Amino acid sequence: MKVITTNNDLQRILFQMRSAGKTIGLVPTMGALHNGHLSLLAIAKTTTDIVVSTIFVNPTQFNDPADLEKYPRPIESDIEKLTQAGCDMLFAPSVKEMYGSNETWRLDIGRLETILEGKFRPGHYQGVTQIVYKLFDMVKPDTAFFGQKDYQQFLVISKMVQLLHVPVKLIMCPIIRDSGGLAMSSRNVHLTENEKKQALVISQALMLVKQQFAFQTVDQLKTLATSIINKEPDVTLEYFEIADRETLEPAGRDSVKIVALVAAKVGHTRLIDNIILA
Ligand code: PAF
């Protein structure tokens, strides 16, 4: 696998690939790779000729400096995992390579910016769109792959692609869970063994809501999920919403495509998860 840290090298190598008629897939990450990331890579490998993965802990999407500071950065083992998984190229730039000084960015992504995740992480999606736009602009992928776990992020990036006419196809890849049901996340490394057990109430609530979806009203399902999560005293629920899959507005009588989304803190670690209901 080629490991590249500068945009110049990236452009030189991508030019050769494109000239050879290869299609390019992009798997953007912030590193601390787990099986969820590797599943994106596996899907990308079946879809495009060349797979470019990126590792960049993007400062502009962190609304909490302490979270940015403690974000795991195991670059050596990440390179090993990507090599084993058959990734063709890793682009791992520095902050200086990606951002000039006094850069500003503001994209009107509507209500998606301020509801659910947006409400709890003000400014987060501006940072996400800013960096993903830069990565799209540099790599110019035919297809880009993102995980369903960050469901709202996928909608936000789709909106950006539509607003800025970015010629890329987006693919949402399924959530990967550990044997207990916990959705894989780079932040899981911060959980103690005990917290990992406590965190299981999150996926258990989602699974039960899916099971009961045909039999209960949206309000009943939300009460059910909330009561399951609140039974675990060390898990602090931030939101549990049953929402329209395209707008993320609360699901109503007429909603056809529906998703349940949850965010909770387990100890000091914030986790998100979701499940498609219809
Ligand atoms: O999902 C992530 O890991 C990040 O938000 C992304 C898309 C790589 C942008 O920094």
Image: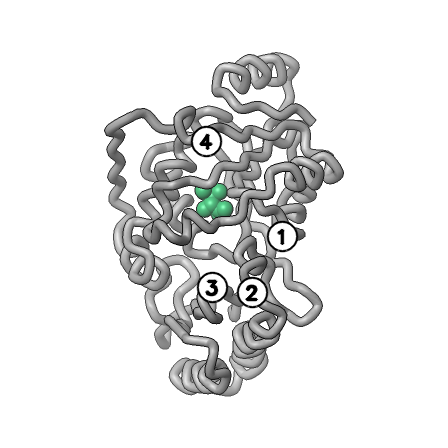
In space, the residues marked 4 and 3 are separated at their CA atoms by: 28 Å
Q: Secondary structure at mark 3?
A: strand
Q: Position of residue 6 (x, y in %)?
A: 50, 20
Quadrant of the rendering where the N terminus is positioned: top right
Question: What residue is disc 1 on?
Answer: 36
Choose between 49 and 80: the one closer to the eye.
80
Query: Residue 174 at what x, y percent from top left?
Result: 60, 56
The residue at the point 66 percent across, 46 percent down is 38
Provide the residue designation for mark 4.
135
Q: Nearer the viewer, residue 122 or 79?
A: 79
The amino acid marked with disc number 2 is Leu
Q: Are marks 2 and 3 in contact (CB under 8 Å)?
A: yes
Nearest to N terminus: mark 2 or mark 3: 2
Q: Earlier in the sequence, mark 2 or mark 1?
A: 1
Residue pointed to by mark 3: 269
Task: Identify the mark nearer the N-term, 4 or 2.
Answer: 4
Q: Closer to the observer: label 2 or label 1?
A: 2
Marks 1 and 3, the one that precedes in the sequence: 1
Image position of 188 (left or right of 41) = left
What amino acid type is highlighted by mark number 4? Answer: Leu
Q: Mark 4 and mark 2: span between their CA atoms?
A: 30 Å
- Which circle marks residue 191 in the picture? 2
Residue labelled 4 has its Cβ within 8 Å of some atom of ligand 1 = yes
Position of 23 relative to 149 (above/below): above
Res 142 → quadrant: top right
The type of residue carrying mark 3 is Thr
Mark 2 and mark 3: span between their CA atoms? 7 Å
Q: Residues at badges 2 and 1 in contact (C-beta under 8 Å)? A: no
Q: How many marks?
A: 4
